[in-house]
Amino acid sequence: MNKQPQVTERTKAMLCKAFWSLYRIRPIEKITVREITEKAGYNRGTFYLYYRDVRDMFSQIEESLLNMIDDLVADMLVDDDRIDIESNMGVILKAAKSHSAYMSVLLGDRGDPTFVTRFKEIIWPLVDRYLGITKSPDMSDDERRLLKEFYLSGLVAAVTTWLSMSNRMPIDRFIAFIMSNVFVSLPRE
């Protein structure tokens, strides 16, 4: 089946693009394989070479994005104990921007809540290394959970809003804005 990887990737990309154009305007339950394949210019048999159904296609798109972000975060965490949150945020924002057609929807109101939860869990070790919330002896577990959710939800909302802006500010300006207005009064170890 995989004798021509470029053709396979192009076919999958076209199917995903067709699906995404429909998903941006309609819930997944209202999207059919027939609509996807007609829009992409393929037959249903081609779709079933790669996906079991529409939900499987959606899951594969989500999984691919989450794996990419997880790999980026893992690479940043192995560097050393210190962390440069500004450059690390830049790497994640560049990845989100390059996949903004997907990320803006998945992180937004029309997205899958489990995607947002998994995204937060992936980026949490990076954020926590900078904030040191889990190492803070002054907080109870409930307080740590509250603060964790506060920062992660705020970051996800800010990134989602940034991705949806028609006149999106440059990544370095966005990071500087967040750093100077959100992380300005954090205690450092």
Image (spheres, rainbow, N blue to C red):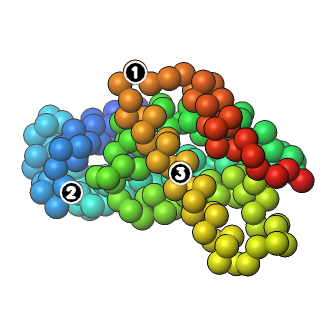
Q: How many residues crowd around disc 3 within 10 Å: few (fewer than 14), some, or many (20 or more)? A: few
Front residue of 130 and 63: 130
- Identity of the residue furthest to the front in this view: 185
Q: Amino acid at mark 1?
A: Asn
SS at badge 1: loop
Residue 62 in the figure: left or right of residue 110: right
Q: Residues within 10 Å of mark 2 (few under 14, many from 20)?
A: some
Which residue lies at the image location 75% right of the left edge and 46% below the top edge? 185
Q: Is residue 64 left or right of residue 88?
A: left
Circle 1 residue: 167
Please give left or right for residue 38 compared with residue 113 in the image.
left
Of labels 2 and 3, the one closer to you: 3
Q: Residue at x 42, y 64 (%)?
A: 114
User: Depth check: 84 or 8 in front?
Assistant: 84
Whichever of labels 2 and 1 marks the residue nearer the N terminus, that label is 2
Q: Is residue 61 left or right of residue 178?
A: left
